[in-house]
Amino acid sequence: MRVAFLPPLLLVLLAAGAGAQPADVNYDESRVPGFELPDPLALPDGRRVADSKEWFGKRRVEILRLYETWVYGRCPAPRVRLRATVLETERNALGGRAVRKQILIPFSSDPAGPRMHLLIYLPARAARPVPLFLGLNFTGNHAIHPDPGIRLAEVWVQDPKHKTWSKQTAPEKARGATASRWPLERILERGYGLATAYYGDIEPDFDGGIRYGVRPLFFRRGQTEPAEDEWGAIGAWAWGLSRALDYLETDRQVDARRVAVIGHSRLGKTALWAAAQDTRFAMAISNNSGEGGAAITRRRFGEQIHHLNARFPHWFCRNFRKFDRREDDLPVDAHMLLALIAPRPVYVASAEEDRWADPRGEFLALVHAAPVYRLLGRPTPELSEMPPVGQPVMDTLGYHIRSGKHDITEYDWEQYLNFADRHLKVSRR
Ligand code: GCU
């Protein structure tokens, strides 16, 4: 039975800003309305998908199209392979523990156009091509580690008074500012590489940022904005991850068939969408991705579709706005986003205090994606109860909820490394 639950919309939104949350948010489990999820294995004619052939040939194609049309928007295929320049290869980075590479990937021939700086660390003296984690960062490559060899990024900065945005070279003091989110030494020690790029290189993250990013490069003559079903910024960032993977395929020290795509929060949404579209990604990791990512949207707990569209109108395709306060009419839900990645391993992680991202909704998406994994012959744990805080469960699907706030921590990475050991450690060569 459905219950009347949220206060009238008069309460609308608090001013968007760091940490500000809309006043109409529901954090009361007893006010989560009943809902019915679309069945990922139901065919339009009412039959159920019989086997993997029908899944890949029919239902998966359909779900992918629904996600493109109603949620993230269509990403264009790249017209040509981009020409990358290796700016640096340092074989003696981090006191001899790593090889560091910095790669410039321009997205167009216009020198003033958008371009991505890919930073790669590989364990030193690896005997074979290494598996690697690839993820975008929020603050520029120099912020992920204090290593003075990392080029200072040009980052998008907002003038607090005039609210205007400009691109500025980051200050020296910003080196390593977000190092707690990237335990690089640990990743290397466990035998993995790490590749990262600043998401603002692909498209800056503000309403109107589109003109500085990659999306206009694909406009048809006379087009001034994406069509209703064309990509938003999340689509652009996901596309950028695939272009990074194109480059990694050319690096003989990397095993591009063993790349895990990872992201935190909005970049967790991005990592899932990248892996859903691009089957070259061997694994996907969603860290606190929440609404519009791994969380079941029909649950109406924490952030909802109208919150996303009001505060971040540039993230999704314009069609997604049609589902503001109409979650039940969306033809897909987050379990189907995860199912698009099947049979590849997916790990979803929540944080106890991150109620905005709806930890239970993130967990339930995995539970309801599991039938697709089973159809494809992949073992999945029988997940019915949410595991307790600090007790990860992992098989082909992985989940944990840790104590603490919305963030990506060393604890999260430890689980991702363990999960990667299960699935990426053995070379498929
Ligand atoms: C906001 C937004 C979330 C998002 C998060 C982030 O809180 O509402 O959807 O995941 O920002 O990216 O940090």
Image (cartoon, helix red, strand yellow):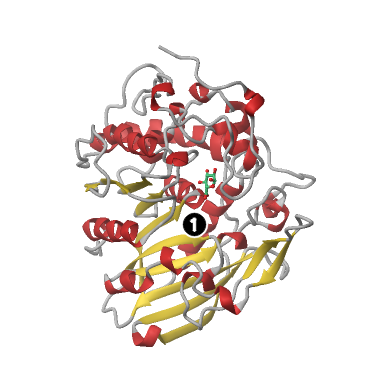
Residue 258 appears in the picture as rendered = yes
Question: Which quadrant of the structure image shows residue 373?
Answer: top left
Measured as percent of width and height from the top left, residue 388 is found at 24, 42
Measured as percent of width and height from the top left, residue 127 is found at 26, 79
Q: In front here: 35 or 55?
A: 35
Of the 4 image quadrants, the one containing the C terminus is bottom left
Mark 1 neighbour density, 10 Å: few (under 14) some (14–19) many (20 or more): many
At a point 23% along the width and 32% down the height, the residue shown is 384
Counting labels gives 1
At a point 29% along the width and 61% down the height, the residue shown is 414
Residue marked by disc 1: 242
Asked if residue 221 is positioned above or below residue 150 in the image, the reply reads above
- The extreme top residue here reads 1
- For badge 1, the amino acid type reads Ser
Residue 249 appears in the picture as rendered = no
Q: In this image, 249 relative to 421: left or right?
A: right
Kind of element beneath mark 1: helix
Q: In this image, 67 relative to 93: left or right?
A: right
At a point 31% along the width and 26% down the height, the residue shown is 49
Q: In front here: 361 or 282?
A: 361
Measured as percent of width and height from the top left, residue 93 is found at 41, 84
Of the 4 image quadrants, the one containing the N terminus is top left
Looking at mark 1, is its residue's CB closer than 8 Å to ligand 1?
Answer: no
Asked if residue 16 is positioned above or below residue 254 in the image, the reply reads above
Measured as percent of width and height from the top left, residue 40 is found at 36, 29
Question: Which quadrant of the structure image shows residue 122?
Answer: bottom left
